[in-house]
Image: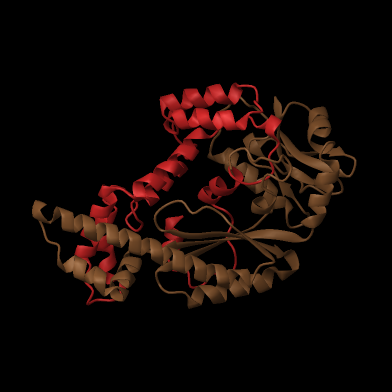
Amino acid sequence: MTVTQRTQNRYLERPAPSSLADVIDTILDKGLVIDIYVRVSLVGIELLTIDARIVIASVDTYLRFAEAVNRLDLTENGPEGLPELMEDITHGAAKQKTDGALEAVKEKVTEVFSGDDEDEDQDYGDEERSRRGRRQSEPAKKSAPNRRRESSRE
Amino acid sequence: MALHVYGVVSAATPLPGGLRGRQEAPVRLVVHSDLAAVVSEVDTDARIRRDDLLGHARVLESLIDGATVLPMRFGMIAETDEEVARNILEPGQSGLTDLLHSFDGFVQLTVKAQHDQGQALRDLLHERPDLRVLRDQTGKGPAFYPAQLRLGEAIAAGLEALVSSDAAMLHDQLSGIADRMVLGDVAGQNQVLNAALLVQRSARTRTDEAIARLSKTLPDRLRLRYIGPQPPYSFVAGELAGEPVWA
């Protein structure tokens, strides 16, 4: 996802097929819903999104911004200074040097679904897996609001 | 075995040959009167993986060039063909048929905009002398901790304002391009806009050109992604069942 963005967007001649991140954005969140047939609970994703919003207004984020800005050399205007700067901002996100700290959170969402070619056990943690397994085999309940409350406690 | 329901089309819709869905199962139609549900068999005990999500999207996307598709949210599972006909197609018959007609000839295209954080910070400091002053008041060491925090907080607020003004600008530009537009949530720090555009299939080329033109006029800090064509996910949300489950 990030790679294509980095390679400039000046020439968006035609739309691209949706990536995994786009799919998560749309098919889990949008589309027709028939309550009695909802069998899949993806609680983990909802929680991660909430986390992302909380983290934005944290002391840690403020300090990282301050540090990034202190290092910013305003005399140069090109993107040359960026790599060093961005490395600093994203020191927590191993692979993502170009985006902000919170992009890493979204990346985590993607990783939840990215274990296909590897060991089966790598895509969810144990706790998450057993929770998910339990929910998926659970008969569908009509009371979505209950499920939501339940999820926010976890 | 159960049935994964991808979406609803008109009964006359031809399926592409050899179309496979989740878990590589062949995709077929459950027809009831003039409507049909797009389904495939699914093992509900298996864990949901990346390919399951992509499979759902790919099946729907493979249909939209030739047909109008009402997409289901991922996760609609029924037991049998009869159940699909009786509980999804039959009660929704008039509603679904109307909905299908209302989207006839339309596809969704999604535009996502994101800030390049480095460039956004740069622009922010160039435009805001007050932030440069704050910056000059900081230094290294614990004594400067409050000053650093003040600076960081002001920067965060500044970036947020920049996101808002860029989002408003993009919103204006894009609303001239689409028949309808729905803004989705933007989660995450550098995300500026997530806009779903509903456009006529026949206007696709014109839309592509308009997006390409727009992308060339934007400031460097803005990165656009242009995704589609998709079924009208963002325009049907919850319409059938009333209260959307996760929304």
Q: Colour of chain B?
A: brown
Q: How is the image coloured?
A: by chain
Q: Colour of chain A?
A: red
Residue A67 image offset from top left, x and y in percent: 21, 58
Residue B26 relative to residue A89: left or right: right
Q: Is residue B7 above or below residue B228?
A: above
Q: Is residue A125 above or below residue B12?
A: above
User: A28 or B227: nearer the eye?
Assistant: A28
Quarter occupied by residue B45: top right
Residue B197 relative to residue A122: left or right: right
Residue B203 relative to residue B121: left or right: right
Residue B27 image offset from top left, x and y in percent: 73, 39
Q: Is residue B10 visible?
A: no
Q: Which residue: 57% across, 53% down?
A: A18
**Count of residue discs:** 0
Residue B85 image offset from top left, x and y in percent: 83, 33
Q: Is residue A151 above or below residue B147?
A: above
Residue B32 image offset from top left, x and y in percent: 87, 38
Q: Which residue: 73% across, 43% down?
A: B7
In the rendered image, the quadrant that contains the C terminus of chain A is top left
